[in-house]
Image (cartoon, helix red, strand yellow):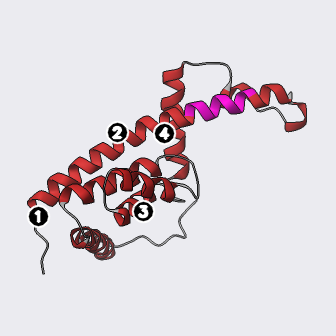
Amino acid sequence: MVGSHLPHLSLHHQRKHLHRLLMRLRQGLQWLLQQEGSPGQRSRGLAAGVFAGCFPFFGFQTLLGLALASLLRGNRILAAAGTWISNPFTYVPLYWFNYTIGKRLLGDHSGGLNGLNGAAAPSVPWKEAWSSGWTVARCVVLGSTLVGLASGVSLGLLCWLWLRRTRPTP
């Protein structure tokens, strides 16, 4: 039987893992409370970072988040942290979702990821491959922009509402 060699977690161990997860979440929220700035500055920084993190510009997401936070007068540390919405665990689902959103809005064309039809690289005409690459890039950038705006604004607003109700403990 496949997977029968894996140990089954008892209810006690499941509760223990859930407790650890909740403690990490609590520590993260405490860290958020301890950052400098008004609730508006902190939430603008987080929103800028989340927006930048939705783009597939590996290595430049943090720089983009910092630049946006500076323009928006947001907390730059939270902007850098917000870019981690995309990480090795979320890259594929996030960018696939962004591509799908962009493709739906730009229309279902024969190009893009479906345009190559799984052909081997030597048999693909380079002009078609180049065109498909640009189609994919346009879809991903459009989708990333829209998903980034929606995610950044939503999380920034939730953060602002939460921070206004919560006072940091000394």
User: Which residue matches tag 2?
Assistant: 150
Depicted 36 relative to depicted 118: above or below = below
Question: Does the image show residue 52?
Answer: yes
Could you say which is closer to the camera, residue 14 or residue 5?
14
For mark 3, give the secondary structure. Answer: helix
- State yes or no: discs 4 and 2 in contact (Cβ < 8 Å): no
In the image, is residue 44 above or below residue 76?
above
Between residue 1 and residue 26, name the one nearer to us.
26
For mark 1, what is the residue? 166
What residue lies at 23% left-to-right and 73% top-to-bottom?
A: 34
Three-letter residue code for mark 2:
Ala
Q: Residue shown at 30%/76% (left/top)?
A: 16
Residue 87 coordinates in the image, percent (x, y): 50, 59
Q: Amino acid at mark 1?
A: Thr
* Contact between labelled residues 4 and 3, with CB atoms less than 8 Å apart: no
Amino acid on which disc 3 is placed: Ala
In the drawing, does residue 47 fall left or right of residue 5?
Answer: left
Distance from Cα at disc 1 to Cα at disc 4: 31 Å
Q: State the separation of the CA atoms marked 2 and 1.
A: 24 Å
**Observer-nearest of 63 and 50:** 63
Single out the residue that lies furthest toward the bottom: 170
Tell me the element at label 1. loop
Which residue is the site of mark 3? 80
Q: Of marks 3 and 2, which one's residue comes earlier in the chain?
A: 3
Coordinates of residue 54 in the picture (x, y in percent): 47, 47
Tag 3: Cα neighbours inside 10 Å, few (<14), some, or many (≥20)?
A: many
Mark linked to residue 144: 4
Residue 10 appears in which quarter of the rendering?
Answer: bottom left
Q: Is residue 20 magenta?
A: no
